[in-house]
Image: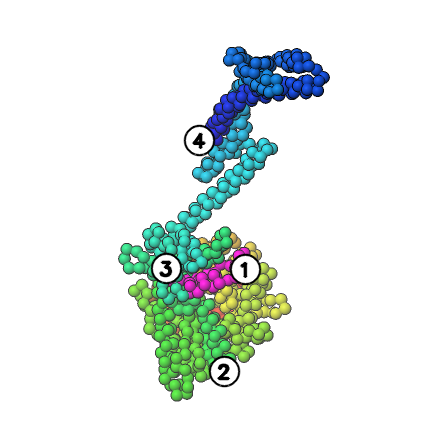
Amino acid sequence: MTLRRKIRWLTWIGLIGCLMAAIPALYLLRQGMIAERTQMAAALVDGALGILADLDRSVASGEITGEEARDRARLALRALSGGPIRLAVHAEGGIPPAWPGPDRAVTVQGRFEPWGWMIGAAGGIGDLDREFLVEASGFLLFLGVLLVLSWPVSRFLSQHVVGPLEGLAARVRLLTEGGTDIDIPGCERRDEFGAMARAMELFRRAAIALIERDERLAGIMNNVSEAILLVDPHGRIEEHNPAAEALFGVPAGALDRQALSGLFIVSDRPRVDALLAGLAGQAASEAEDGRQPVRIAALGIERQGDGAPERIDASLTISPLVVQGRRGFVCALADVTERLRHERELTRLATRDRLTGLPNRAMVESMLEAAVDGSRRHGRRFAVLCLDLSRFKLITDTLGHQAGDALLQEVARRIVAAVGAAVGDAAGVAGAAGKDAGAADLVGRIGADDFAVVLEEIADAADAAAVAVRILDAFDAPVTLSGCEHYVRPAVGIAVYPDHLAASDAAADAAGDAGSPLVLLRAAETALYAAKRMGGRRHAFFRPELAEQARRHLALDGDLRAALALKQFRLHYQPKVSLIDFSLEGFEALLRWEAVGKGMIPPGEFIPVAEETGFIVPLGDWVLDEACRQMREWLDAGMAPVPVAVNISPKHLRNRSAEDFRRIIDRHDLPPGLIELEITEGAVMQDLDHALTVLAALKAMGIRVAVDDFGTGHSSLSYLKRLPVTTLKIDRSFINGVPQEREDAGIVSTIIAMADMLGLHVVAEGVEKTEQANFLRHHNCNQVQGWLTGRPMPADAASGLLKERLREPA
């Protein structure tokens, strides 16, 4: 029953109660009125008796007579009688039966013994009934008015008291059922109901915030990939999310009330229990905000499944939790099996070469740091060997990167085998000397085709040289790639710590890092470059002058680029002379560098640096462009043209096409036949297919092509037959020995005969003696260049030769 109905019922019950109570009240009222009239009658009787007594005493005293007293008594009693009460005197001493009459309902009587009179008082109640009816009517009218007024009063109470209470009660019921999208009426009121409404509005907003927060937390718990567990102070699981069931592979509800440590493998359970005990033992007064989550990186879990349990790794993070003074823990678990596997793989990739499986440069440097520390503590020597492959880029460019990868794998295998065999032999010999035969030697790949070997505990530099020889001997056998055999010609640079690093790098020593791995590797690489300059398949030890030379080359690299911008390069021209009539047949353009403050720098010093750094490509373009410009100047001056030969380096040839060379020549509007490009055998053999394509296109354009230093490289009739060249130049190393050296004379005569058979022109360079010229002329080599016929000269002097066209013996 609603409060509104209760109030209405209470109102009606109250009114009915008032009515029911009015009946006995009215009855008692009438009875009271009758009793009051009876008392009045009794009082009249008593008064009359008192008067009779007074008169009787007057008679006794003789003041009046008896008769006179009785008359006076009747007169007094008659005076008292009147109104609603009438007095009657019965002198006979008795009350007649008919007295007092039907209209008298109240009677009181009294006897005055001295006289024998009976005094009676009788009163009617008709007037009392009329008064009673008036009183009852007023009372009933009052009740009627109350009944009439009860309805609006009840409605007022319903609307202004019960109604707001019912509205607030309905909102409370909706709030308890989760309905928060409601309005709270009466918030604007200033009475107690308004205060209640505003309090309920605050409660509604708080409920909304709590519901939203609960929904967000539930969404997070149900959708987060990590397993979330709420654990009580005793380490038992109270709540968990679906991810926990998936992590442990158990059905819903299987984790409830389980011990947290029991979810992990046996060996990890003590760690979990110790962690929970440590957190639970913290002082209760400790600030919760000051606690940091505790994390165990990897714990073993046996995930349940259809088959055998699966072993996985999980990270556990535990945070203390206090709710309403009750302590517990929030535990987060994540499957880190794949992450740990990736980390291990990343660690392997960070320290190992992916292709060969050898340690990479970073690991080699770490091993070198350990070797340096061990050498300093125990006074032991160790060596660093750097190895580089020749023709590696040629193989990758011609056979592809797969062939290059196969080559690197084979090279790594041979180096490891050679180092292992060399160290094994040394250990057997030095075992009696106390050498640790179990010392770990390290072979690593530190670059594209660069390898490093760390030899620990060597006796002296000879041990390192023996290992280097073993490594070089391992490449006597060819490497089979794509069905063809290829020879690899490595070079090895050696640095021995601390012998060869005492004066290795003055700048590094001044900085205090002369023994650092970077300096050690730099020393070995410097020695490697020296071995490569000696022709490959060699080993070389580090020397201080090599470091100085390397620094000079580094400085030259920057100076070279500045020199080209500052126009410090010059071309000198060496005449080519006919041995028949000693006429001028052409020039070879030779590059010279006149540096400010340094004078003339020899080509042998800066050309290798330019070739190594790649600067030779723009520098070669400038040489060809400058030679064409000079030729254009001579032609414009009306001089008889002669061909000018320009040297093209191997790297220049690899990085340019025939159209690139032709574009430079056409820029100066020169006939193609006036330019001759000289290339070496090595330039051709480094990339034979590209060289054949470029040379064939040049020959088709009418540009002359000469093979320089012929006979010093991999000369082969099969290759020579395929080369689209016009001229062979015999290297000066053969010319120096003729005619005295039989071998040189035979080689020179053979080259001349071979060129004659192939229809090629022959030019001998480095001719400095008359007997050399006579030998060449006798064997039909009619064009020479060298100091005998003319030294390189500036362009002005070459212009003078063109003007004079001298035809007399040099």
Image mark count:
4
**Label pair 4/1, CB-CB below 8 angstroms:** no
What amino acid type should be assigned to the residue bearing mark 2? Gly
The residue that mark 2 highlights is 379
Find the distance from the CA under tag 4 to the CA under tag 1: 53 Å
Q: Quadrant of residue 479?
A: bottom left
Find the distance from the CA under tag 2 to the CA under tag 3: 54 Å
Classify mark 1: helix, strand or loop.
Answer: loop
Answer above or below: position of 695 versus 35.
below
Residue at (43, 77) in percent of width and height: 455
**Label pair 1/2, CB-CB below 8 angstroms:** no
Find the distance from the CA under tag 4 to the CA under tag 3: 55 Å
Give whichever of discs 4 and 3 has the lower sequence position: 4
Give percent across and percent down for residue 144.
53, 19
Residue 1 is labelled as 4
Residue at (41, 53) in percent of width and height: 238
Residue at (38, 76) in percent of width and height: 419
Horizontal relation, residue 119 to residue 654: left or right = right
- Can see residue 394? no
Give whichever of discs 4 and 1 has the lower sequence position: 4
Residue 286 is labelled as 1
The residue that mark 3 highlights is 263
Give whichever of discs 2 and 4 has the lower sequence position: 4
Q: Nearer the viewer, mark 3 or mark 1?
A: 1
Instruction: Tell me where the magenta segment starts and ends, as one range.
Output: 271-300
